[in-house]
Each structure stands twice: as structure tokens, then as C-alpha cells.
Image (cartoon, coloured by chain):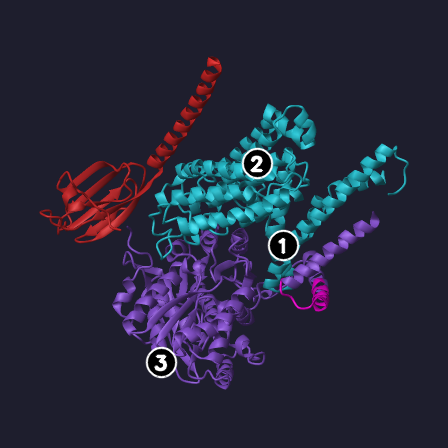
């Protein structure tokens, strides 16, 4: 009985640690419930697509795809072009996706080929590949744009005539997807207040009697995320999806079954990269500003961290892991600085506290994963031996 | 099995300790002790506060939120916030000021910056938000605050985003007068006796419209004043070489630059981190230094010349005197200058003070008027007795439109071991307002 | 053999069709989504003297009041827009009202010379400033 309880906690150790720390940090931070819910909804809408793009390579046994940052860069190039041409609104966003797709496909094929030569070491290889392509991207954006790639908008270019500026305002596509179906959740009192501030205009109003404060819900973004989840569930059942799962189980068995292993692995990476491209565009339309040289830096790191925190492992990840992970990870990010500041009384210690706790927790997550995997191996070995009982 | 488990946990703890040290805190033992005490105190306080009802304290009528960098990023800005806390009290203890920081790695962590600023708006008593320096992400954060709370006054100090972008979101932005100083700094160099002007920077800074435009103006001004303009590149401290690598580069290349351009060359750098090694080399080897990008007696001089200013904290005239003595002793007298009062420190304090006066209704004129400009300058003068400030509204070089939400300020330069250069009263020739950063489109 | 070759051809033909459709989609998005700046210029052009005052409204934007020799700008999304103008004389009375639909097609910014426009002249579009 105790063993069973221990097992349950141990199998979900990482989310458990996060929940416990959050339980302490939330009251310490002093934020109101409506603020936390609003921030979480915004972040779920903003980040989920990126994290969902990680599921397919895991299914194909290729581990955590750090190469999703390649897709992020492809999306950013698409955004730079539509900013130059001045395309705004939903057409702008769709056109950016359209332009980013072929770039993401090419980068995905390149990444897939390299990963095929590094079987068993995909994660580290894709991590380093990310740095390499980052260099290529910076060369394209800092030297080729404005010179070989025609960019005419002076707000985008540096003073020397070529090269893109550090911060590009995405005011043309700011929040277009989020506000496509504007939805507010509030109580009847808040509804009146909201209408006073923001005047008329069509939006959906969900009224909950006990709710304090008004919350904006990016409904269109959530619908797209839901469609994506349906796509993943459907994909698992297709022939290609089954092939990938077979490869994930065992490459040699899949090969003898006649599945083109290398080609399927490349397809898995290409799909992941293209989806990361769309995910980054959704992320940036919510942020409203593009840091040309930095926005993609943490795309891979944070998405993977969130996925791990949701309880996923290198070989198995479900859609539940994605959403649990995004909620817990970002909750920590929201409350930790304020909690640290209120705990110790100095503002900058709050910042160090956040960095300390957030990245330290990622380290713990990886350690606990390794521990869990060891336990599973032990348990498998024990069951093979016929469970002679006792400790390891 | 158990051993491996304990080993992994110990390694994780060592990782914590290591990352804490890397984050720049004092030694692990000091830190452990301090954190233990602080945590004990904090948890006790937090729990008692949560358990009992709020005791009757004298509560401030409204709150002012101040967002600055940490000491490792930009110390002066933070010290200005600490001054305001001393003057008006911390909101956690019933005072007015809520002080938070943006991440050190702000180029990559824009999400955190935005959410930090937005968190301030969650406080129903918040009436003013000051962000100094307004790093990328501030405009977006301000837009979201505005959507939630239209009653908060939003003030941006030294914005990193283009004037057009930040003015759409903030009520007032203040910036060092990059247009005026593009002319006055080379002029100051010439007055001090320089024949060459060397501008040291890197691509990220030159992509900022304000800094890039200033460089273009400096080039033109040097041509008109008859001194040679040279641009030298140094590494960006936020790149992979880090602050240490960037500073080393300056230290190592200065002798070569002095050799190439002579001892009557004036040096100027755009990055705070580059300033310290530059000052050290100018004092030791020769050359001139008019003023830093964000000038202050504390900018670079204490570190470069090993000056201990712990006793004079907050007393700017005393700080200036001590720095001047050290500069003259090191042989740099008459060749190195600064502003008598720190820009970063004064901006944080003046913006918070201005915001407080606006909310209290001390001046009833609308923002964007000549009167509002005077009030801004008054707020600055208040924290800098004895120094002269010049203030003006930003005029867009392309359209010629005056932007009344963007204020430019500059202070007179004081030469250490010499006197004020009288640059605050200089009339900027009209042509410099029409110089553009980007060349005309092909 | 022939059947296999035909299948191969069909597959590539289908792919080409899809590619062409995507490019067409891209061009259409470019066409309908582009934001243009419409410069409104109340300056003398040849025989058309600058108007005393003209109030211009582009689609549903704020009304731009332009005295002599003034210039203003409005932003518009999409290939065509509607412009409504009222011309005033020195006494502040409306002496003319014009409404027109203008197509921009693929250029980025355009400048409308208002005196020419108000007079009903055909070529009232002049090169936009840079």
C-alpha cells in the first residue's frame, strides 16, 4: 500500500515538486486570482502550439527536438518579410506562415538528415544544430537582408542600409489571432465596467456570477490549438503515425517490417519544424514585438522544460503532459519573482530567485527523470528475475 | 541505488549553489547564512501577515511602481529607486513605492519583462509606473496595462525601442538628448583639445534609432568642427564573449588605438560595460574622454581607478570631489569629463517624483505642453542642485513633426580637474535636426 | 510501363497544381492585406490652386482638416478605399462635396493632390514622399 503510494508520487515527482513550490509561492506573491488566471490563459494560448510540436518526434523515438528553434527562425523570416511589405491583420499572419513553411521544410530536411547520422544522440545533436543554424540565420538577417534580399522599409533597416534592426514592432499583426473572436469572462458588474472602458464592439461575453475581475480569452487561438490536438490524435492512427510509433519502439524491428526508417524520421522532424514555425508566429503575434536576434533563443529550451515538467519523458509524451506542463511552468515564472521579493524584501533578489528556482527546477526535473528511468529499469529487471523481493 | 540517488540530489544542490554564485551573490557561506536568516524572517512575516488581519498602518493614498535593472545591469537606476523608497516608503510597509526588477538577460526574456510590468497593474492602488531603462517589451507591456487600467500614468526612462513605438504606449518617455549631444560631445572634445574622435560601439546598439542617429550626427558634427571621425567596433557584452570578454577587448586594443590615432584623440563608447576599461586606459595612456553614454561620476570611474565611495553614497558633490581627486592623481586631470549628477539615478527619481506630482494634482496642465516640459525639468533640477539641465521635445527627422510624448534632456559636462564646459547652453545648429539615420531609399 | 509513367506524371501534375494554388493564395493575401499610406496634400499643382480648407475622411478614419500647404496621412488596408471630402471657402462655408472610390492595386503608398482631386481632374495621384 505504502509502496503503491510511493510509486504514484515517484512517477509524478516532477509535477509534484512544482505544485508544492507553487503552493508556497502563490500566496507569497500577493497576486489576485483573476490576474493569475488571465496571465495563465494568455500564456497557454501563446506557448501551447510550440510545445505540441514536440510530440511527434518523441513519438518517433527521436527524443526532445531541440531543433524546433529552426522552425522558429523560419517563422521569423516570414514575419520580417510581411513587415517589410506592410501586410497587416490575419492576411499578414497567414502569409507569414505561408512564407515560413518552405523555409521550415528545407531546414527540417537538413536537420533530419543530420539526425539520421547521429542515431541515439539526437537531442544533443539537434541542440548544437540549433546554434549552427542560429549563426546562418544571423548572417541572413544581418547581412543579406537589405542587400541581396530586398528590404525597403526604413523602419526595418539599420543606418548603414543593410541588416535588420534589433527590435521590430509587429503592430500590424499584434494580437490578431487572439482578438479574432474577442471573448470576455466576467461577472455582470465587471461587464458594465468593461463596456465603459472599451466602448462598444462585438465580443462574446461569458458571465459567471461569482467571478471577480474581467478576463480576456483568446478564443480563436484556443480553437486552433484544439484543432491541432485533434490533428495529433488523428495522426497517431494513420499509417505514417503508426510507422513512426513502430520506429519509436524499435528501429530494427520497424526496418525488418519494411518501414523506410530514415525517410520516416526525416518526415517526423520536418512536421515538427513546420509546426514550430507556426507556433513561433502565434507566439510573436501575442508578444507584439520581434527581437530579431533573440526571440527564438528560448523557444526550444522553455518548451522542452514545460513538457518535462508536465510529466513527459524523453520517450513518452501525451497531450496532457503539454497542458499540465505549460500551466505549472509558467505559473512558476509568474509568481517566483514577486514571491522572492516579498520573501527577502529586495527587488533584485526576486529576479535572482526566479532564475535560481526556475532553472534549478529544470535541473531537478532532469535528475528525477533519470532516477525514474533507473527505477523502471530496475523494476523490469526484477520482473524478469521473478521478483525475488527485497530492495535493490 | 540509494547512493546514486543521494549523489544526484547532492549534485543538484551543488548546481543550485553554483548558479547562485554565478548570479553574482556573495560567497556561498555568507549567502547561505543571509538567505537562511532572510527566509526565516520572511516566512515568519508572511505567515503572520497571512494569519492575522491587516494591522492598522498609515497607508499611502496611492502606489508608484518602479521597474529597474539589477545592480549587475545598471546600478545607478536601482539606486535611484532606493532613494525614492527612502523618501516615500516601501508599499509593503504602507509606503508608496513598489520596486521590481527586469531580467538581466532581457533581450532573450521579453516574456518575463512584460509579465513583471503587468504584475504591477494588478495592484488597485497603483497610479504611476516608471520603467528605467525601458528595455524592449516595455511598449507591449504598457499597451497591456493600458487595456486593463486606463488610469495609470506610464513613464519610460531611456527607452531602447524606437521613439515612434514607445510613444504610442507610454505617456511620457525621457531620453538623453541624442540629437543635441551628437553635436555637443564632439564640440566638447574639440574644446578639450582633441583632433580625432573615436566612436566605439557594436551592431545591436547601432540598430537602436536613437544611438544610430546620434552616431550619424556626430560624424557630421566632426566634419563641421574640423576633427576626424573614426568608428571602432568592440564586442557586445550580451553576446557569447560576455562582459568579461568585451572589457578585455577594450583593455587590449587601447594601446594600439592610441598608437594609431595619437594622444590627442577623444574616445566615446555606447555601452556602460565598455566605459570602465576605456577610462582606465585613457587615464594611463593618454587621449580624451568627454563623457559616457549615460554619464555619471559613478559610471566607470570607481572601478577603473579603484575609488572607494562607500562613505559618500548618495552625496553627489562629495562623490564628484573624490572622483576628481583620483582622476588628477592618476594623471587624467583636464582630459576626462562627466556629468556632475548621474543620469540613471536622477531619471528614476525625477520620473517617480514627476508622476507623484501629476497624480496629486500639483500641476494641472495637460501632458505635452510647454508647462509640462518645465515641470519635468524642475523635477530633474530638484535632484541635481548646482547643475544645469536643458530639455526639449523630440522632433522626428523625417516628418518634422514634434513628438510631445518624448522628452530629450542633457546636462552640462564637467571636466574633472577642470571646469564645466558650458555645453548645456549651446545652441544646436538647425541642420542637425534634419540628419537622418537611414539613407534615402533607393 | 506507360501506366507507371502516367501515374508519375499525374502525381507531379497534382503537386504543381497545389503549389500554384498556394502561390495564388499568397498573392491574394498580399493584395488584400497590404497596408497603404494615403498622403493628403493640399498644395498647388500647376493650375490647381491650394484650397482654403478641405476636410477629408478616408474610409472611417478621423477627419483630416487641411489648410493651405498642409499635408496629412491616413492608413488604409486593402486595394481600394473610399474618400469623402468637403471643401470650404474663407467664410467657412462648404462649397463642394466629393466622394470617390479609389483603387491602389500593387503600389505601397500614394499621395493625393487635393486641389486637383476637388476639381474633378483625372490625374490627381502624385508620387508619394519617401
Which label number is shown at residue B189? none
B342 and C19: which is toward the camera: C19
Colour of chain A, in one word, is: cyan
Q: Quadrant of residue A123?
A: top right
Which chain's residue wears label 3?
Answer: B
Q: Quadrant of residue B30?
A: bottom right
Which chain's residue wears label 1?
Answer: A
| Label 1 Cα crowd, 10 Å radius (few <14 / some 14-19 / many 20+) | many
**Residue A126 visible somewhere in the drawing:** yes
Q: Residue furthest left?
A: C47
Which label number is shown at residue A336? 1
Image coordinates of residue A215 in percent, x first then y, are 53, 43
For disc 3, the marked residue is: B193
Colour-to-chain, red? C
User: How far is mark 3 from mark 1, CA to CA?
Assistant: 53 Å
For disc 2, the marked residue is: A269
Colour-to-chain, purple? B
Q: Which SS class for mark 2?
A: helix
Q: Residue furthest front?
A: C1
Classify B360 as above or below A251: below
Which chain's residue wears label 2?
Answer: A
Image coordinates of residue A213 in percent, x first then y, are 54, 46
Question: From which residue to which does the magenta span run?
Answer: B23-39
Amino acid at each position: 500500500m505504502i509502496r503503491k503510494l510511493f510509486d504514484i508520487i515517484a512517477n509524478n515527482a516532477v509535477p509534484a515538486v512544482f505544485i508544492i513550490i507553487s503552493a508556497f509561492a502563490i500566496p507569497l506573491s500577493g497576486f489576485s486570482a483573476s490576474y493569475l488566471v488571465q496571465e495563465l490563459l494568455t500564456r497557454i494560448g501563446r506557448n501551447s502550439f510550440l510545445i505540441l510540436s514536440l510530440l511527434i518526434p518523441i513519438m518517433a523515438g527521436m527524443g526532445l527536438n531541440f531543433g524546433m528553434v529552426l522552425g522558429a527562425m523560419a517563422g521569423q523570416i516570414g514575419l520580417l518579410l510581411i513587415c517589410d511589405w506592410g501586410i497587416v491583420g490575419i492576411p499578414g499572419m497567414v502569409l507569414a506562415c505561408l512564407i515560413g513553411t518552405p523555409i521550415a521544410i528545407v531546414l527540417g530536411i537538413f536537420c533530419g538528415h543530420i539526425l539520421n547520422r547521429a542515431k541515439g544522440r539526437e537531442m544533443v545533436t539537434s541542440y548544437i544544430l540549433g546554434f549552427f543554424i542560429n549563426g546562418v540565420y544571423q548572417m541572413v538577417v544581418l547581412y543579406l537582408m537589405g542587400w541581396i534580399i530586398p528590404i525597403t522599409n526604413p523602419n526595418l533597416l539599420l543606418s548603414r542600409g543593410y541588416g535588420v534592426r534589433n527590435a521590430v514592432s509587429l503592430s500590424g499583426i499584434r494580437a490578431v489571432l487572439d482578438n479574432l473572436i474577442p471573448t470576455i469572462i466576467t461577472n455582470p458588474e465587471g461587464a458594465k465596467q468593461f463596456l465603459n472602458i472599451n466602448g462598444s464592439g462585438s465580443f462574446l461575453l461569458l458571465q459567471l456570477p461569482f467571478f471577480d475581475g474581467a478576463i480576456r480569452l483568446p478564443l480563436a487561438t484556443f480553437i486552433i490549438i484544439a484543432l491541432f490536438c485533434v490533428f495529433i490524435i488523428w495522426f497517431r492512427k494513420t499509417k505514417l503515425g503508426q510507422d513512426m510509433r513502430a520506429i519509436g519502439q524499435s528501429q530494427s524491428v520497424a526496418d525488418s517490417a519494411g518501414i523506410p526508417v530514415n525517410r520516416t524520421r526525416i518526415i517526423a522532424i520536418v512536421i515538427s519544424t513546420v509546426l514550430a514555425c507556426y507556433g513561433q508566429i502565434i507566439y510573436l503575434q501575442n508578444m507584439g514585438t520581434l527581437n530579431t536576434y533573440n526571440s527564438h533563443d528560448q523557444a526550444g529550451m522553455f518548451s522542452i522544460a514545460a513538457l518535462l515538467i508536465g510529466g513527459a519523458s524523453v520517450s513518452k509524451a501525451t497531450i496532457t503532459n503539454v497542458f499540465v506542463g505549460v500551466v505549472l511552468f509558467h505559473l512558476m515564472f509568474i509568481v517566483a519573482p514577486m514571491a522572492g521579493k516579498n520573501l527577502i524584501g529586495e527587488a533584485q533578489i526576486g529576479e535572482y530567485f526566479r532564475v535560481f528556482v526556475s532553472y534549478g527546477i529544470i535541473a531537478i526535473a532532469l535528475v528525477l527523470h533519470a532516477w525514474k528511468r533507473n527505477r523502471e529499469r530496475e523494476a523490469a529487471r526484477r520482473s524478469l528475475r521473478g521478483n525475488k523481493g527485497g530492495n535493490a | 541505488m540509494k547512493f546514486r540517488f543521494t549523489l544526484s540530489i547532492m549534485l543538484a544542490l551543488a548546481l543550485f549553489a553554483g548558479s547562485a554564485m554565478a548570479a553574482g551573490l556573495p560567497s556561498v557561506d555568507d549567502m547561505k547564512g543571509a538567505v537562511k536568516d532572510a527566509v526565516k524572517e520572511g516566512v515568519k512575516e508572511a505567515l503572520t501577515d497571512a494569519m492575522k488581519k491587516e494591522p492598522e498602518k498609515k497607508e499611502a493614498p496611492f502606489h508608484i511602481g518602479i521597474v529597474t535593472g539589477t545592480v549587475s545591469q545598471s546600478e545607478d537606476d536601482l539606486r535611484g529607486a532606493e532613494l525614492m523608497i527612502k523618501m516615500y516608503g516601501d508599499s509593503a510597509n504602507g509606503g508608496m513605492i513598489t520596486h521590481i526588477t527586469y531580467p538581466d538577460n532581457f533581450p532573450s526574456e521579453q516574456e518575463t519583462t512584460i509579465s513583471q510590468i503587468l504584475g504591477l497593474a494588478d495592484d488597485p492602488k497603483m497610479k504611476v509606473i516608471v520603467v528605467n531603462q525601458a528595455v524592449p517589451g516595455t511598449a507591449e507591456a504598457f499597451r497591456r496595462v493600458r487595456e486593463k487600467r486606463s488610469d495609470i500614468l506610464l513613464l519610460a526612462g531611456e527607452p531602447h525601442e524606437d521613439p515612434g513605438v514607445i510613444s504610442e504606449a507610454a505617456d511620457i518617455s525621457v531620453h538623453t538628448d541624442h540629437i543635441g549631444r551628437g553635436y555637443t560631445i564632439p564640440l566638447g572634445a574639440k574644446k578639450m583639445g582633441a583632433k580625432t574622435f573615436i566612436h566605439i560601439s557594436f551592431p545591436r546598439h547601432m540598430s537602436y534609432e536613437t544611438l544610430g542617429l546620434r552616431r550619424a550626427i556626430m560624424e557630421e558634427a566632426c566634419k563641421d568642427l574640423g576633427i576626424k571621425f573614426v568608428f571602432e567596433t568592440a564586442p557586445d557584452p550580451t553576446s557569447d564573449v560576455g562582459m568579461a570578454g568585451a572589457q578585455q577587448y577594450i583593455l587590449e586594443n587601447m594601446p594600439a588605438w592610441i598608437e594609431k590615432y595619437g594622444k590627442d584623440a577623444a574616445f566615446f563608447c555606447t555601452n556602460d560595460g565598455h566605459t570602465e576599461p576605456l577610462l582606465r586606459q585613457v587615464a594611463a595612456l593618454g587621449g580624451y574622454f568627454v563623457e559616457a553614454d549615460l554619464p555619471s561620476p559613478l559610471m566607470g570611474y570607481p572601478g577603473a581607478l579603484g575609488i572607494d565611495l562607500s562613505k559618500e553614497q548618495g552625496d553627489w558633490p562629495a562623490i564628484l570631489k573624490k572622483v576628481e581627486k583620483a582622476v588628477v592623481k592618476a594623471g587624467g586631470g583636464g582630459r576626462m569629463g562627466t556629468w556632475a549628477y548621474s543620469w540613471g539615478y536622477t531619471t528614476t527619481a525625477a520620473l517617480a517624483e514627476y508622476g507623484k506630482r501629476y497624480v496629486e494634482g500639483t500641476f494641472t496642465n495637460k501632458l505635452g505642453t510647454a508647462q509640462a516640459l518645465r515641470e519635468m525639468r524642475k523635477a530633474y533640477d530638484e535632484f541635481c542642485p548646482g547643475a544645469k539641465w536643458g530639455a526639449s521635445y523630440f522632433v522626428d527627422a523625417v516628418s518634422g513633426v514634434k513628438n510631445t510624448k518624448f522628452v530629450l534632456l542633457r546636462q552640462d559636462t564637467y571636466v574633472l580637474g577642470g571646469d564645466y564646459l558650458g555645453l548645456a547652453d549651446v545652441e544646436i545648429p538647425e541642420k542637425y535636426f534634419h540628419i537622418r539615420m537611414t539613407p534615402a531609399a533607393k | 510501363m506507360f501506366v507507371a509513367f502516367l501515374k508519375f506524371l499525374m502525381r507531379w501534375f497534382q503537386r504543381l497544381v497545389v503549389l500554384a494554388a498556394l502561390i495564388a493564395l499568397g498573392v491574394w493575401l498580399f493584395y488584400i492585406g497590404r497596408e497603404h499610406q494615403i498622403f493628403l496634400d493640399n498644395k498647388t499643382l500647376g493650375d490647381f490652386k491650394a484650397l482654403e480648407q478641405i476636410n477629408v475622411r478616408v474610409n472611417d478614419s478621423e477627419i483630416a482638416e487641411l489648410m493651405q500647404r498642409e499635408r496629412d496621412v491616413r492608413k488604409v488596408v486593402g486595394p481600394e478605399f473610399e474618400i469623402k471630402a468637403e471643401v470650404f471657402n474663407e467664410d467657412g462655408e462648404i462649397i463642394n462635396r466629393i466622394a470617390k472610390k479609389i483603387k491602389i492595386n500593387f503600389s505601397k503608398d500614394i499621395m493625393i493632390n487635393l486641389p486637383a482631386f476637388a476639381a474633378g481632374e483625372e490625374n490627381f495621384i502624385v508620387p508619394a514622399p519617401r
